[in-house]
Amino acid sequence: MTPWEIKGRELANCNCAYGCPCQFNALPTHGTCEAAVGYEIDNGHYGNIKLDGLRVSATYKWPGAVHEGNGEYQIFIDVNATPEQRDAIEKIVTGEDTEEMATMWWIFNAMCTKRHPTEYKKINIEIDVENRLGSVVVDGTLNIKGEPIKNPVTGAEHRARIDLPDGFEYKIAEMGSASTITTAGEITLTNNKDSYAQFAELHLNNSGVIR
């Protein structure tokens, strides 16, 4: 198993209500799980291959809860990545060289029966975890826009966090609101409008979250 480690930031948007029941081992709000995510790798490596500054995005769709399987997904990798970096990132985000059930990527891959061909795109990502602001733009393919949850009466920003001491993705995630528009790619997302968003700092390796 090739040793790898990454530190970075994540913006994820799914079609669930704020809070996302899946984070608590409950069923999705609307029965299905439909998501888009972007990752900014601040620093990382796969063996001797540096991954600093690279960006990755993905779309996912399941007909029910993730753990019920039969999902599909597609990965988008930074066009600026070298062939070696592309291969390294693809291995990480498809759960290869990872202990069983150690990361979200291992689980997502295991729960999908269809993996669409990876595409290499210009990807722009801006993620401010603390302030719950972010955007992910995969050129000609998708756009995720995230912001704080707003109080429905006053319009003031509402802050909430999810703390998962034994989670496989993050330690703490800031809750937000986001919308995703897909214009190309193999997976179309039409239900991600002002829905669940999470902003998180990531620190992962072959064994999962580094605490």
Image (tube, rainbow, N blue to C red):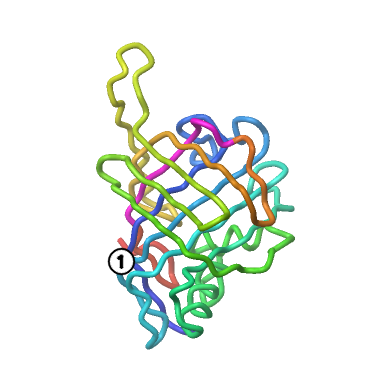
Residue at position x 62%, y 35% from top? 191
- Badge 1 density bin: few <14, some 14–19, many ≥20, Cα 10 Å: some
Percent coordinates x, y for residue 112 in the rendering: 69, 58
Q: Secondary structure at mark 1?
A: strand
Percent coordinates x, y for residue 150 in the rendering: 35, 24
Q: Name the residue beneath numbered marker 1.
A: 42
* Residue 24 falls inside the magenta stretch: no
Which one is in front, 62 or 65?
62
In screen coordinates, is 27 left or right of 204?
Answer: right
Query: From this viewpoint, which residue is outermost toward the bottom?
Result: 48
Residue 28, picture quadrant: top right
Q: Which residues are magenta?
A: 192-201
Residue at position x 37%, y 40% from top? 162
Percent coordinates x, y for residue 211 in the rendering: 30, 61
Residue at position x 45%, y 76% from top? 81
Q: How many marks?
A: 1
Query: From this viewpoint, which residue is outermost toward the left?
Result: 130
